[in-house]
Amino acid sequence: MRLFITGGSRGIGRAIVEAGLAAGHDVAFTYRVREDAADQVLAWARERHPDRRCLAFPLDVGDAEAVERVGETALEELGGVEAAICNAGAVQNQLAVQMADADWDEVIRTNLTGSFYVARHFLMPFLAAGRGRLVFLGSVAQHGLTGQVAYAASKAGLLGLARTLAKEYGHKGITSNVVVPGFFETDMTREAMASTHQAFWLEHCPMHRMGKLDELAQVVLFLVSDAASFVNGQAVSVTGGLDWAV
C-alpha cells in the first residue's frame, strides 16, 4: 500500500511514517518548515527500510494550489496512493476573548481547511480505483477545551468533515474516519501544555500514563487496511479512557 501523510516529520506523523514503512508500505509525507527533521526521517528510512520508498515534500496544507501540486507529484512518484492521513496541525492557546483573528485563521486553515484540501485532492484517484482510505487526526479537545477555542473548533469540524465524506463515498469503497488521540508526548504537548495540565491528565487517565506513539500509529494502520473495510464514519479514541474519565 502507498500512504500519503501530512505533518510526517515529527511526533505523531513521524510515528505513522515509521510504522507504515515497517509494515511494508511506501510512504510520501509532508512537512511545513522543518526540513532538518524531514531529512532525519528520510535518513532513518534509508537505513532501516532501504527496500521501501519514502518521499518528503514541503507543504503548507492550507494552500490549495500547493496541495494539488504536491498531491499530484506524490501520486506520480509513488505510482498511486491508497490512503491519505491528515495529521498536519497547528495550535494557538488563548481564551476566546483574547484570540486574535490571525491566530484563529491559522489554526482553522491548517487543521480543518487543510485536511479538506488533502481529502478533496485524493478523492478522485480513490474513486477511479474503487477504493481509498481517509484518516483524520482529531483530539479530545473536540468536545471543548478551555484556552483552546480555535483548536477545539477545528478538531470538532473534522468530525463533520469525516462523517460527511463517509456518507458521500462509502458506497464507492472509500472509508473516512477520525482517530482521537489522548495524551501522548509530542512537541505540541511539551511546548503548548503546562506541567500542571499534564499532571491533571495523567491523574485522571484510567491507565495513569501517556500513550506510546506506536500504539496510535498502529490504530491508523488498521484503519487503512483491508481489515477495516467496514469501519466508516467513526471517531476512534486512543486515549486510555481519558475522554470519558474527565
Image (spheres, grey):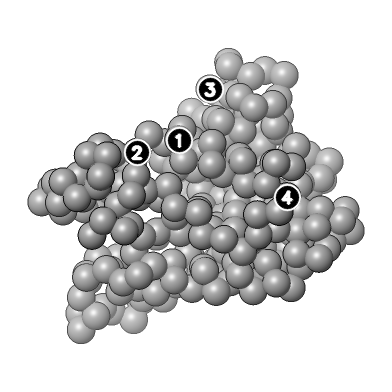
The location of residue 97, given as percent across then percent down, is 20, 84
The residue identified by callout 4 is 229
Q: Amino acid at mark 1?
A: Glu
Q: Amino acid at mark 3?
A: Trp
Q: Residues within 10 Å of mark 1 (few under 14, many from 20)?
A: some
Mark drawn on residue 215: 1
Find numbered disc 4 in the image and state the secondary structure of the residue it sits on: loop
Left or right of 152? Residue 82 is: right
Residue bearing the label numbered 2 = 211
Q: Earlier in the sequence, mark 4 or mark 1?
A: 1
**Residue extending farthest left:** 196
Is the residue under label 3 in contact with that under label 2 (CB below 8 Å)? no
Vertical placement of residue 68 versus 81, above or below: below
Determine whether label 2 and label 1 are within 8 Å by CB.
yes
Task: Say what amino acid the circle numbered 4 marks.
Answer: Ser
Which disc, if any, is residue 44? Answer: 3
The residue depicted at 72 percent of the width and 19 percent of the height is 51
* C-alpha separation, residue under disc 1 versus residue under disc 3: 20 Å
Q: Check whether the beta carbons of the residues at disc 4 and disc 2 lie within 8 A of each other.
A: no
Q: Nearer the viewer, residue 217 or 49?
A: 217
Q: Amino acid at mark 2?
A: Gly
Name the quarter where the N terminus is drawn.
top right
Q: Residue at x 64, y 74 (%)?
A: 164
* 3D distance between C-alphas at marks 4 and 1: 20 Å
